[in-house]
Image (tube, rainbow, N blue to C red):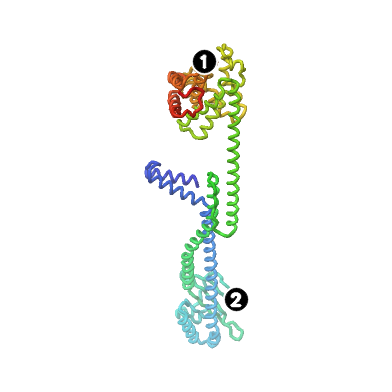
Amino acid sequence: MTNKIQKIRQFLLDVVQVRPESTFSRKTIAAIDLCKAFTHGISFKLSLLITFLVCVTAGGISLVVISTMDNVQLQSMVRRGAAISNAAAAPAGYSILAEDRLALDNLTARISQSQPDLDYLAIIDNTGQILAHNSLALTGSVFQKSPGVPIGNELGLNVRKVSRDNNWIYEFTVPILFSGNQVGHVITGLNASMFAAARSTAANRIIMIISLLLPLAIAVSLLLSRLFTYPIEQLSDGVARIQSGEDQVIVPITSNDELATLTRNFNKMAGTIEAQKRSLINYSEDLEQSYADIVKILAAALDARDNYTYGHSSRVSQLSVAVGKKLQLKPYELNELEMTCLLHDIGKINIPDSILNKPGQLDDDEYQQIKDHPYRGVEILDLTESLKKYIPAVLHHHEWYDGSGYPENLAGDDIPLYARVLSIADAYDAMTSSRPYRQGMSRHDAIAELKSFKGRQFHPEMVDLFIDALDEYDDVCDMPLSGRCL
């Protein structure tokens, strides 16, 4: 069915030669899709089944009625033919013995006049010679028998369906008895055309009645199928609404039967699902909050190792989230960015305190250990599936825009977005934080430094967005910064 509909759709598009986005083609395709939905529905299948059963039943009843009428009409004709033949045979015996030909002719004439559908009436002797016939010209000749189909033979009455002069005749043969002796036969022929006409009339009337009743039956079948399938469609729609995440799904009850019971149970199930959903959401929110708190505690513990940079990761996360809002990131993306910032220096957990808190210049080996902390962070995050999504930014937050950073010398837009944002916030907080060997920069000087490295170390667009985010806190310095609010 699907392949046929696709072929029809393509055919219509080829015929009208319009683009798929045109108004006509959209309406055509919508109509095809509607037909597809209807023909695939239970309502259509049930209607088709009921219509098929109605047609088969009506056809079967018609055949039975026509066959019954044929038998009734045939039996009626047989009785009539037998009555005519017996009416001729009763007085014919005496006339044959008395050789009263005039009486026989008069008998056949009177019977023929009273029976308009009588094709012939012949009185013959035992040798087959015609003693009397409604056609006088045949009197005295030998009666010519024709091959035919036996219809019945009961109590001396022999009935056959024979063909004479290209016409079908029901022929009745009755023996003529006188004093217990057979002296001849009466052969009566009734034309089958009247029987055929009556049969045709009856059949036409039956067909006409069925033709009038069939559309009504089909309409009733469609109505019945709709009554049965509408609650099922409502339930299907309810399932789809639950699947799409809709809250408080209630399917109306339209009947008082088993489907109503099913609908009530569905509504109870939907209520249970909704309650469980709310419970899971609350549990998920609590779990997510606990997860975030654990990460914050871990970041705080890591920052606490350096007496001069305590709160660094928290400040970097807030600065980065401010830029993320400028980028119009989605709420879940802002959460990921915040978690990334909190975890960006987790690799430093392997670096000795003597190096982290060294007041003087680092030697080459010590500096190399510092440069390796992104790799150490990746090793830690890779241990847990839920933390792997933070690896790209943690690994590359020390890359430079011009490609001269570390650890993999990425450049430009090849640097992950979160890493581009994080690198600026990380550098800004480092510049504005005081160390034993230097005083932290003011906001003004730190911004000037960022601008000087714009396009070299930092992504130009990210620098502009970062400065815009800082400007929003000029009047009220509520963003936690290590430097002075100048």
Q: Is residue 359 left or right of residue 20?
A: right
Residue carrying label 2: 154
Residue at 51% over, 87% down: 100
Which x, y percent locates residue 107? 49, 84
Q: Is residue 24 above or below residue 474?
A: below
Which label sits in the foreground, 1 or 2? 1
Residue 454: tell me if it is visible. no
> How many labels sit on residues?
2
* Residue toward you, 392 or 288: 288
Residue 219: tell me if it is visible. yes
Quarter residue 340 falls in: top right
Q: CA distance from mark 1 to mark 2?
A: 136 Å
**Type of amino acid under label 2:** Glu
Quarter residue 389 falls in: top right
Residue at 47% over, 32% down: 325
* Residue toward you, 416 or 115: 416
* Residue toward you, 349 or 153: 349
Which x, y percent locates residue 253? 55, 56
Q: Label for residue 417?
A: none
The local secondary structure at tag 2 comes to strand
Q: Is residue 302 above or below residue 164?
A: above
Q: Earlier in the sequence, mark 1 or mark 2?
A: 2
Which x, y percent locates residue 194? 47, 73
Which x, y percent locates residue 315? 52, 26
Q: Is residue 256 above or below residue 312?
A: below
**Type of amino acid under label 1:** Arg
The local secondary structure at tag 1 comes to loop
Which quadrant of the figure contains the C terminus? top left
Q: Label for residue 438?
A: 1
Q: Is residue 289 left or right of residue 428?
A: right
